[in-house]
Amino acid sequence: MGADITPIILMAGLTIVAVMIAINTHGLLRMSISYTLAAALLGLTAVVFFNHAGLISGKGSRHSELTSEPVEKGIDDRPHPAESPSPQRARLAAELRRLAAEGIACTNSLLSRELKDESVELETLVGRASETRRRVEFIKGEFNRIPATDAAFRKPLASIKTGIQLLSEAAQLYLQYYYAEDSKQEETCEKLLRQKAKGANEQFLKASNALATYK
């Protein structure tokens, strides 16, 4: 630091000497020359002083940047708390995957089932349809108990909700099939049942694929 201000001390000293000489000088010409020299030295001293102050300020700023860079980098590299999966989110994802799997199993059962089976009594067939409807209602009740507050699960939640609605309609058509008045009504019920079940299956698969990314 001492070596840095040496030029300022030297110039200040020369300026003081020049001013003292100018004060003690006699004669107009000598006084003019002395005061001019003193003024020049004073200006030069000011220039040296301000240049020195600028260098110190620049070094200080650079030092501040260098020392702050590691801190800022450290802050940027830290994982955001929201990126870490919480136990609550993990449980919700697991529950939604379970419901999607149940929906897929139920729709596959409907799509592969033969509605008309001459070897089975009508009462048994109606019982199967009623059991399917109860199963769908259970899935629906389980879904309605899930808190839909996490925005990260908005899409799979919407897909499961749509799938359950279509599955519920398919289950109702499954039961109505055995109360049809004629073969035409049976054909219509079966056709709509297959369409609803297929649509529900697609929604459950969509939800399952989306939930596969959640841990």
Image (tube, rainbow, N blue to C red):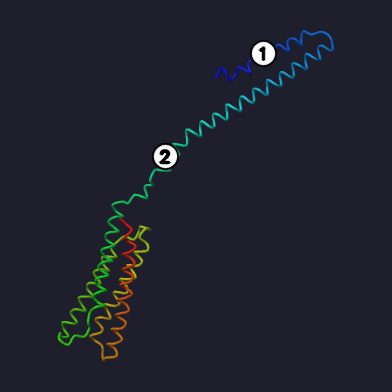
Taking the spot 21% from the left edge, 85% from the top edge, the residue there is 116
Secondary structure, mark 2, is: helix
Q: Residues within 10 Å of mark 2 (few under 14, many from 20)?
A: few
- The circle drawn on residue 177 is none
- Kindly report the distance in space between the C-alpha atoms of the residues bearing marks 1 and 2: 49 Å
Task: Name the residue located 33 percent from the left edge and 74 percent from the top edge.
Answer: 199
Mark before the other along the chain sequence, 1 or 2? 1
User: Could you classify mark 1 by the number of other residues whose Cα lies within 10 Å: few (under 14), some (14-19), or many (20 or more)?
Assistant: some
Q: Which quadrant is the C terminus positioned in?
A: bottom left
Towards the viewer: 145 or 123:
123
Question: Residue placed at 77% from the left, 15% from the top?
Answer: 35
Residue 18 in percent (x, y) is at 73, 12
Residue closest to the eye, 182 or 10: 10
Q: Residue furthest right?
A: 28
The label shown at residue 74 is 2
User: In which quadrant will I find the N terminus?
Assistant: top right
Query: On the picture, is 44 further left or further right than 162?
Result: right
The percent position of residue 39, horizontal first and vertical second, equals 75, 18
Q: Where does label 1 land, which residue?
A: 13
SS for tag 1? Answer: helix
